[in-house]
Image (cartoon, grey):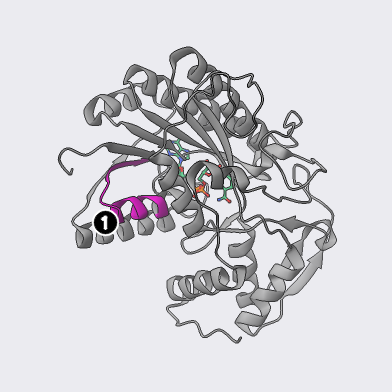
Amino acid sequence: MLKNQKKILITGAAGFIGSALSKNLIKEGKSIVGIDNLNLYYDKKLKLDRLKDIEIFNSIKKGGWIFEKCDISDRNHIFELFKKYKPTIVINLAAQAGVRYSLKNPESYIQNNIIGFSNILDACIKNKVENFLFASSSSVYGSNKKVPFNEDDCVDHPVSLYAATKRSNELIAHSYSHNYGLACTGLRFFTVYGPWGRPDMAPMIFTKSILEKKPIDIYNFGKMQRDFTFIDDIVNCISACSEKPAFADLEFDFFNPKPSVSFAPFRILNIGNGNPIELLDFINILEEKLGLKAIKNFTNMQRGDVKKTFAETSNIYKWAGFKPKTNLKIGVDIFLQWYLNYYHNKKFVSSF
Ligand SMILES: NC(=O)c1ccc[n+]([C@@H]2O[C@H](COP(=O)([O-])OP(=O)(O)OC[C@H]3O[C@@H](n4cnc5c(N)ncnc54)[C@H](O)[C@@H]3O)[C@@H](O)[C@H]2O)c1
């Protein structure tokens, strides 16, 4: 652990976003405690390999990285770790992710996303954490028709349990922020893609199927749009927010010059690309780059899914001076380079 440094505790550190964020913060010379329960929701080897990658990076950079295996729903263990490391910044990324999985496994969402999340909040209050950030999701916008999705839009109608737990996190965090003065920033991520991605998400599923010449299920007959956001943009935004604790608006709202209803040091911010694309166009890009055709199986919309996501990005820019900027074709190139190297030990030559 580096001396005289603000310690950052990241939950879900072996996950897609958590591992990329850990490396980004190590690069910035930060002192980090990463925790994860290494659950089996998807291939555990991928999580262990991400941790190995962080360790190698940390030893090259002579960083201050420590990993602890811990389940955030284990309250005593969480309190022990907070006491041991005394973090000043906490970034909660650990969660049961996935929309479709929530239809069959609701208990996992309550256990991890509600009970686990509340344990982290309690530990933050007890240990006087200075800045708490947490992962929310574009899924809270449900089937809203008005685009782009703005942080002030109504998000009272979640269409999946996953979205309901993420919205609950925002509401629970607001009450802690209001009552205990905890600086909280909820970050609504929009479909993240890139190296070390999640095998249950479209970019990984599509790439695997195209390479193995297996059919791809294309929901809602392809009439879906996603605001794909590159992992580097996401972690750069989180890093920027980790240095800027939310503050109370008092009588002035930072984003709108009108009296605010919230007096808590609390922010909700979208982190998305602000440039949604059709799923079929995304598949076209993969096909062109891989030089292979996808076998498409057009099918109905899945329960719990939404047709479109589209982030309004002006508020994250105003707050943290940061706007996601990675062009989709460049981001897909970087993703495929990693994918072919990791799964096939091959170099990627873009067919563009
Ligand atoms: N990837 C996206 O596109 C996206 C979009 C919106 C929101 N999010 C949110 O961002 C966060 C990170 O997502 P990700 O894509 O990296 O997912 P991920 O599943 O790759 O990472 C989550 C990590 O948390 C760990 N974890 C889960 N429950 C835990 C628990 N009880 N205790 C300790 N560790 C636990 C898992 O083992 C995993 O390594 C999640 O909260 C997710 O809901 C992600």
Residue 206 vs 348, above or below: the answer is: above
Left or right of 25 in this view: 96 = right
Q: Position of residue 261 (x, y in %)?
A: 64, 19
Q: Residue at x 68, y 45 (%)?
A: 100
Q: Residue at x 45, y 81 (%)?
A: 346
Judged from this view, the residue extending furthest toward the front is: 257
Residue 158 is drawn in which quadrant? top right
**Residue 11 seen in the figure:** no
Left or right of 11 in this view: 81 = left
Numbered circles on residues, count: 1
Q: Which quadrant, please, contains the N terminus? A: top left
Q: Residue at x 29, y 27 (%)?
A: 82
Q: Callout 1: helix, strand or loop?
A: helix
Cβ at disc 1 under 8 Å from ligand 1: no
Q: Position of residue 24 (x, y in %)?
A: 36, 54
Residue bearing the label numbered 1:
55
**Residue 243 seen in the figure:** yes
Residue 217 vs 309, above or below: the answer is: below
In terms of depth relative to the viewer, which is nearer, 17 or 230?
A: 230
Judged from this view, the residue extending furthest toward the top is: 179
Left or right of 82 in this view: 117 = right
Mark 1 Cα within 10 Å, few/some/many (few <14, many 20+)? some
Q: Which residues are magenta?
A: 20-35
